[in-house]
Image: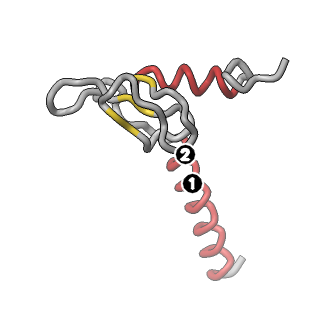
Amino acid sequence: MDAAEIGVLIGGISLIALTLWFFFGKREDESATVTVDGKPIYECPMHPWITSIDPAANCSICGMKLVRRGDVGAKREAMQQGHGPHAHH
């Protein structure tokens, strides 16, 4: 192997490692689920960037009811396993 091949190999491995870290690396602390004024944050299980402090709010994209931020992981996992509101039996 010459220097160019080694450089490409190292670059490829670095890119793969960075991609894996981005998708599977440490997530933000789930305990940080309250706003500054102490109210819980609610988010859409399908669109986690849609948030509100209103517990009765719905997602502005899909209309799903927002759930407490700490509960989203369990809801999302259930949906992926086919136990969500759109599951086919």
SS at mark 2 in the image: helix
| Residue identifier under label 2 | 23
- Specify the quadrant that holds the C terminus: top right
How crowded pointer 1 is (Cα within 10 Å; few <14, some 14-19, many 20+) is rated as few
Q: Which mark is residue 59?
A: none
Q: Are marks 1 and 2 in contact (CB under 8 Å)?
A: yes
- Specify the quadrant that holds the N terminus: bottom right
Counting from the top left corner in percent of width and height, residue 10 is at 59, 67
**Which residue corresponds to the image point at 56% horizontal and 22% vertical from the top-left?**
75
> Is the image coloured rainbow, by chain, by secondary structure, or in one colour?
secondary structure
**Which residue corresponds to the image point at 50% horizontal and 27% vertical from the top-left?**
65
Instruction: Please tell me how many numbered marks the rendered image carries.
Output: 2
Counting from the top left corner in percent of width and height, residue 62 is at 57, 39
Q: Is residue 21 above or below residue 56?
A: below
How crowded pointer 2 is (Cα within 10 Å; few <14, some 14-19, many 20+) is rated as few
Q: Which residue occupies the extreme right position in the image?
A: 89
SS at mark 1 in the image: helix
Q: Is residue 52 rendered to the left or right of residue 49?
A: left
Q: Is residue 13 above or below residue 86?
A: below
Q: Is residue 78 rendered to the left or right of residue 48?
A: right
Counting from the top left corner in percent of width and height, residue 82 is at 74, 22
Counting from the top left corner in percent of width and height, residue 5 is at 68, 77
Q: Mark 1 and mark 2: span between their CA atoms?
A: 6 Å
Disc 2 marks which amino acid?
Phe
Q: Which mark is residue 19?
A: 1
Disc 1 marks which amino acid?
Thr
Q: Is residue 26 rendered to the left or right of residue 1?
A: left
Q: Is residue 29 above or below residue 8?
A: above
Q: Quadrant of residue 49?
A: top left
**Which residue corresponds to the image point at 30% horizontal and 30% vertical from the top-left?**
53
